[in-house]
Image (cartoon, rainbow, N blue to C red):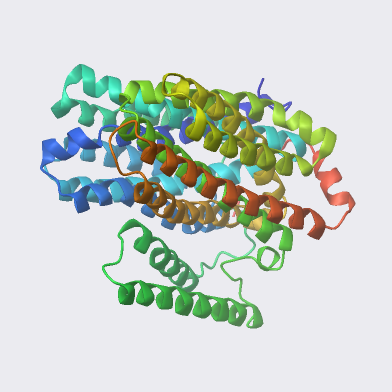
Amino acid sequence: MLPGDDRAARRVLLVCLAAGATTLLDQAVLNIAVPSMRQSLGATGADVQWIVAGYSLAFGLALVPGGSLGDLHGRKRLFMAGVAVFLAAGVTAATGGGPVTLIGARLVQGAAAGLVNSQVIATIQDVFHGVDRGRALGLYAVTGGVATALGPPLGGALVAGLGPGTGWRCCLLLSGPCAVLTLALGARWLPPPRRTARDSRLDLLGLGLLCGCTLALMVPFIRTPNSGGEALLWAIAVCVLAAVLAAHQRLRVRRGRPPLVHPTLTSSKPYALGTAVAMAQFGSSLAAFLVLTVFLQDGLGLSALLTAAVTLPGAVGMGISSALAWRLVRRIGPRTVSVGLTLGIGAALAGVAVALWAPTPVLPAALAGTQLMSGAAGGLTVSPNQTQVLQHAPAEAAGVGGGILQMAQRIAAAICLSAVPTVYLHVASGPPGGNHARAGYALASCVCAGLLAAGLLLSLLRHAATPPGPSAAASTNRTVVVPRSKETT
């Protein structure tokens, strides 16, 4: 059952869920079709890297600008424009004749997806409050998990049924009908755009510095530097841009101008610690999923469809626990996140034990069991943590607050997706089914458990740094509000 007592609010949530499924399914379904796409286009390894990673890079870069523009000018127009551009770029990518066209289209599509998702998170914040907000964010997380889990088997079925030349193009077109449906529902059900920021002036220099800092931080993990000197230059660029951005934000505050990042966000320890928790959980889960799929296919020699069957229980577990997490939140409050992270650590360590000691015939089934446990942990962590983080973002900065949270997660994903698989590949040399692959998976799972342990520590620190007061309780009892008036400026 959808949260909220207002029928209009539930319709808004359906639009948000459709948008999340559209953008996340597109990325998940392409990964399984990369080998056939590379063969069909004659693409190089660098081309494939940018086709796959460019989407995430552009996605992350667009989140904060998209959230800021939504706060300033209203969310509906930006949402609709983002979905439309996403659809057009997807068609261009599917019909492209060469790697360059595909890379450009995927960059545009990723930026459009970031614009859409920044409006989605902010819209949920605008419409839902208290426990209903947590349940709405939980359903959004479930939608993302299910879309990610369904992507590989759908992509594998398309490639197997239509052949490698046509299958990968149909994978890129798979999100098209979803985008058309999202546009139709959004035009009819989204509330009229209204500005939530008090000042309509956009901090262009701040946006440029933030995007440059994000780019300098993510690119080295997407495209590995050729030398230590190049890596050092990237690190220096990140530090310099971050320092200039911080100085620029302080200067705007002293001059009485609105900064890009709302002062409430920069001064809130619970917001910063909660964002760090989200980074640890998001990076760990994505890296663990990637290592598992590589281990199952290269280490154990399973097909893509059997690999998808092993990972599917994770989506089931996340769906069930996300739907029930709000009940646990009512009982123990913010400690729900700590419970979820503890369960995630247990799931990662169970994966270590299974990889080292389970007999080969039962290994896939045992790993499916650990995936169920890991998915349940994610459901208890993601949406309750998002709710706790975003309650510290004021209404006039809801878009920016949500954008920063998602951008931080994308940065964590870029780092973890580069570092953790490297750990696995460094150890997992040898014939399929050999002990090297098992040891590599066990070591990578230990790294993921360590990341979750860091997240658990940060969660406990956040709980200690959150002052008790009536604000959280009051927000729980606030009613659902869906703007119905004409556009305001």
Instruction: Note whether 221 is above or below 246 in the view shown.
Output: above
Indicate the quadrant where residue 381 lies: top right
Q: Is residue 220 visible?
A: yes
Give how far across and how far down residue 458 sits, in percent: 69, 56
Quarter that holds the N terminus: top right
Q: Is residue 14 visible?
A: no
128 vs 169, left or right, is right
The tally of labels here is 0
Q: Nearer the viewer, residue 27 or 400?
A: 27
Q: Nearer the viewer, residue 191 or 479?
A: 479
Instruction: Note whether 427 is above or below 329 in the view shown.
Output: below
- Residue at the spot 64% in from the left edge and 50% down from the top edge: 453
- Residue at the spot 28% in from the left edge and 42% down from the top edge: 89
Give how far across and how far down residue 475 sits, in percent: 80, 44
Q: Nearer the viewer, residue 447 or 428?
A: 428
- Residue at the spot 55% in from the left edge and 50% down from the top edge: 74
Give how far across and how far down residue 105 sits, in percent: 25, 46
- Residue at the spot 70% in from the left edge and 64% down from the top edge: 264
Quarter that holds the C terminus: bottom right
Give how far across and how far down residue 183 sits, in percent: 42, 32
121 vs 18, left or right, is right
Q: Nearer the viewer, residue 84 or 98?
A: 98
